[in-house]
Image (spheres, rainbow, N blue to C red):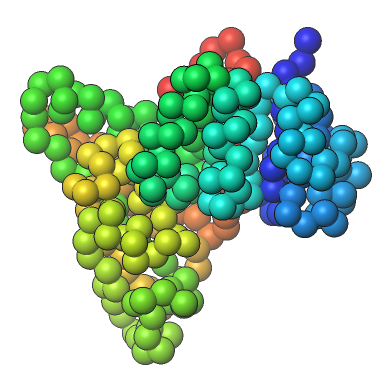
Amino acid sequence: MKTKFGIVGCGFLGNIVANAWKNGLLEDYELVGVTSRSPESAQKAAEAVGCTVCADVDALLALDPEYIVETASVEAVREMAIPVLKRGVNLVVISIGAFADLAFYEQVRQAAREGGAKVHLASGAIGGFDVLQTVSLMAQAQNLPETAGIETHTGARGFRNTPVWAEHLLTDTEKTTVFTGSAKEAIATFPRRVNVAVATSLATTGPDVTGVTMHSVPNWVGDDHRITAEIDGVKAIVDICSSTSAIAGWSVVALLRNLASPVVFY
């Protein structure tokens, strides 16, 4: 019997997941329905892959999925995570920035325990959570100091509508460091660009300790995230450079395949 799942969010990333299912890359699953804040997007996605279009998350839950895949937004996670988990439905999250609110993160953990469900954090634009967590565990077990940080290079336009924006970033001839601080400070400064900072801090030393440095690079397309976790004797580096957000959608597909596989990679 195939595992039922539904998708919340029918934009670019949600359609990557839906089309992967349609094209046979999620053969152990049945896509039972989709929903979106845009009814037109949901209708279009449902018609394209052959599943039910749902007016809201409650209608999607009525189809009895085992997994809800979120490819929508931080706001969507905040609205649906707790009720979904309390119903015993597993949640796959791409908008990890929702957990910048550590109080909400703890509420989600408790809801998952109460419902006997799991929250699966997709690797999105970075990955390497396994090795980052391993280094942190070694630090805890051996009472060793750990340093963890993120260094990001992105194009100047990526900083528009943020507190660090300046017109000269568009004409600079060399990279400009626009932010240096903790992950907690980065989350407060860039509330719409926090998925990487939140994911890294949760996997390593926490938002108060994890360092973040951001650079604006002339004519840069995409993002380059270099994440480091280090203790005495071990240094882990994860460096992902991507000119498209498609990798985030495909990370969800890879996660679902891993969950269904008899051989699981961690």
In the figure, residue 132 lies in which quadrant? top left
In the figure, residue 225 lies in which quadrant? bottom left
- Residue 183: x, y in percent? 28, 53
**Foreground residue, 101 or 199?**
101
**Foreground residue, 195 or 233?**
195
Locate residue 203 relative to residue 41 in the image: left or right.
left
Q: Is residue 216 visible?
A: yes
Q: Residue at x 30, y 43 (%)?
A: 201
**Foreground residue, 109 or 7?**
109
Establish if 162 lies above or below 166. above
- Residue 231: x, y in percent? 13, 34
Locate residue 241 relative to residue 237 in the image: left or right.
right
Establish if 251 lies above or below 36. above
Q: Residue at x 8, y 29 (%)?
A: 144
Q: Residue at x 60, y 20 (%)?
A: 88
Q: Residue at x 34, y 77 (%)?
A: 164
Where is the N terminus found, in terms of image quarters?
top right
Locate residue 132 relative to residue 30 in the image: left or right.
left
Number of marks in the rendered image: 0
- Residue 56: x, y in percent? 76, 43
Q: Is residue 19 visible?
A: no
Locate residue 204 relative to residue 154 in the image: left or right.
left
Establish if 262 lies above or below 256. above
- Residue 29: x, y in percent? 74, 22
Where is the C terminus found, in terms of image quarters?
top left
